[in-house]
Amino acid sequence: MIQLEKKQVKIISIIIAVIFMGSVVALALTQTGGVASAASSSNVGKINYQQVLMQHPDNQTVDEQFKAAVQEIQKDFEEKSQGMNDQEKQEYYQQCQQRVMQKRQELLDPIQKSIEAAVKAVADSKGLSVVIEEGAVVYGGQDITQDVINKLSKK
C-alpha cells in the first residue's frame, strides 16, 4: 500500500470536504430553484370551494328556498306527529330529516354544476390539468378562487 504522510492525508481530506460541501451547496441551489419554478409554472390549481359557494350569485335565493322548505317540513312534522307514540314520532322524524336532505341536494345541485363548469373553464384557460380544494394543498398550486367567482358572476 501507499504510505501517505500526515500532511498529504490532511490535504486530501480537505479536498474531499470541499468537494462534498460544494456538491451539497449545488444540490441545495438546484432544488430551491426547482421548487420556485415549479410553484410559479405549476399546472395544478387550488380553489376555496366554500368561498365560491358562498359568493355564488344564486346562493341567497337557494338559502331562502331551503329555509322555507325546512319550515314547511317542520310544520308538517309538528301537525302529523301529535297523535303518534314515541316510536312513530322517531320514524317520522327520520323521514322528515331525509326530506330535508333531499331538498338541500335538489337546491344545491344546479349551483354545484355551475361551479364545476366555471372551474373547468378557468382551469382550461389557464392550462391547469388538476384543481384541488385549497385545504388539501400543503404548498404551491395556482389559486383560481377569485377567477371562478368572477366567471360565475358574469353568467
Image (cartoon, rainbow, N blue to C red):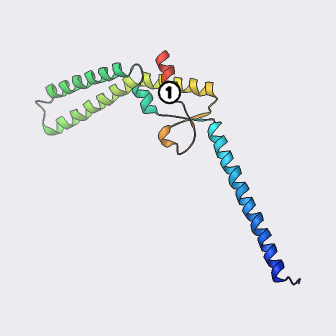
Occupied quadrant, residue 96: top left
- For image coordinates 53% across by 27% down, the residue present is 119
Secondary structure found at label 1 = helix
* Depth check, front residue: 86 or 116: 116
Q: Amino acid at mark 1?
A: Gln
| For residue 37, side relative to residue 151 (left or right) | right
- For image coordinates 71% across by 55% down, the residue present is 27
Residue 123, given in percent of the width and then of the height, sits at: 59, 28
| Location of mark 1 (residue) | 146
Occupied quadrant, residue 95: top left
Q: Residues within 10 Å of mark 1 (few under 14, many from 20)?
A: some
In the image, residue 63 sits, relative to residue 28, either above or below, namely: above
Quadrant for the N terminus, please: bottom right
| For residue 123, side relative to residue 4 (left or right) | left
Residue 124, given in percent of the width and then of the height, sits at: 61, 26
Occupied quadrant, residue 101: top left
Can residue 155 be seen in this snapshot?
no
Can residue 64 be seen in this snapshot?
yes
* Depth check, front residue: 69 or 51: 51
| For residue 88, side relative to residue 12 (left or right) | left
Residue 112, given in percent of the width and then of the height, sits at: 45, 26
* Depth check, front residue: 14 or 82: 14
- For image coordinates 50% across by 27% down, the residue present is 146
